Amino acid sequence: MERPKILIVEDEVVISDYLEETLLKLGYEIFGKAASGSKALELVESTSPSLVLMDIRLKGSVDGIETAQLIKEKWPVPIVFMTAFVDDKLVERASSVMPYGYLVKPIQSANLRANIELAIQMAAIREKQEKTEDELYASELRYRTLLDTVPQRIFYKNTKSVYLTVNKRMADDFGVSPDDFPGKKDSDFFPKETAEKYRNDEKQLLKTLESISTVEEYTTKSGQKIVNAVKIPVMDKNGDVQGILGVLTDITDQVQSETERLNLEKMLQQTQKMEAIGTLAGGIAHD
């Protein structure tokens, strides 16, 4: 296992040497030593250490707290502060940087090890959490992009038929944002009779736990549409219902085409009948 690399930032030579000797005895590797904030920044920029031991009261234009803030803004390196002075103002300033620990001088070997190990473990946990959050965000972004690019209207409700989320396609039908749907019900968007029908359908779905598929009118801001509405019960790993997933497919054009086809067939049949009658009438007249 690779030994943690520690950067010592301390302007008192005696203390710096003591820390180096103690850390080596404890099994750590010395990443480097700096007596000023500018030197510390230079070393961290070259290769990130596992941890920085930072004296709060560094001499020069940039003290330890300011140096720690600059490091934190650029690199995810855990920092443990060291100080011989503890006062409220100093602690308040230091806390704003969110360090991983404090060591009060004179520093004992046991306290030094405990602070370093705890800081390294906490930093690893935070890094894992941030990575998980980034992965979740990326996954959610892919999911949202997929939902917003499909032609269907998609929604998800809880078991009380309250909207939890919808895709952009459905929100656009009502001239609102997807963020306007959560917490709302069908009665907030549809005529009373339509909303009641939807609620009754969903009550039946939750009772039977069977998907339903219907062809129905769908009133939007731009007018009436005909949709194929499929609603599915969503269950967790224990089989308990968590909500209702709905997918609405606009079939207005297909229905209109089918209606036109049927009307055309009907007209053709009527024409054929008229032609037959005409032929029959012509034959009778000829006789």
Image (tube, rainbow, N blue to C red):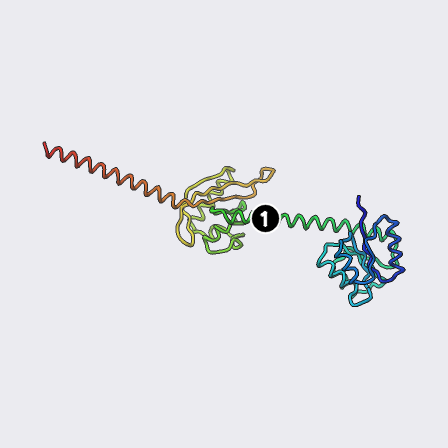
**In the image, 157: left or right of 85?**
left
Q: Position of residue 200 (x, y in %)?
A: 46, 44
User: Residue at 48% of width from left, 52% of height from top?
Assistant: 171
Q: Position of residue 287 (x, y in %)?
A: 9, 31
The extreme bottom residue here reads: 61
Q: Amino acid at mark 1?
A: Glu
Relative vertical location of residue 155 with respect to residue 279 in this rendering, above or below: below
Tell me the quarter of the picture where residue 35 sits: bottom right
Relative vertical location of residue 119 with respect to residue 207 in this rendering, above or below: below
Relative vertical location of residue 219 with respect to residue 93 in this rendering, above or below: above
The extreme top residue here reads: 287
Nearest the eye: 170 or 8: 8
The extreme left residue here reads: 287
Nearest the eye: 213 or 78: 78
User: Residue at 46% of width from left, 54% of height from top?
Assistant: 174
Quarter of the picture containing the N terminus is: top right
Element type at mark 1: helix
Neighbour tally class for label 1: few under 14, some 14-19, many 20 plus, Cα within 10 Å: few
Q: Position of residue 20 (x, y in %)?
A: 87, 54
Q: Which residue is mark 1?
A: 140
**In the image, 203: left or right of 68?**
left
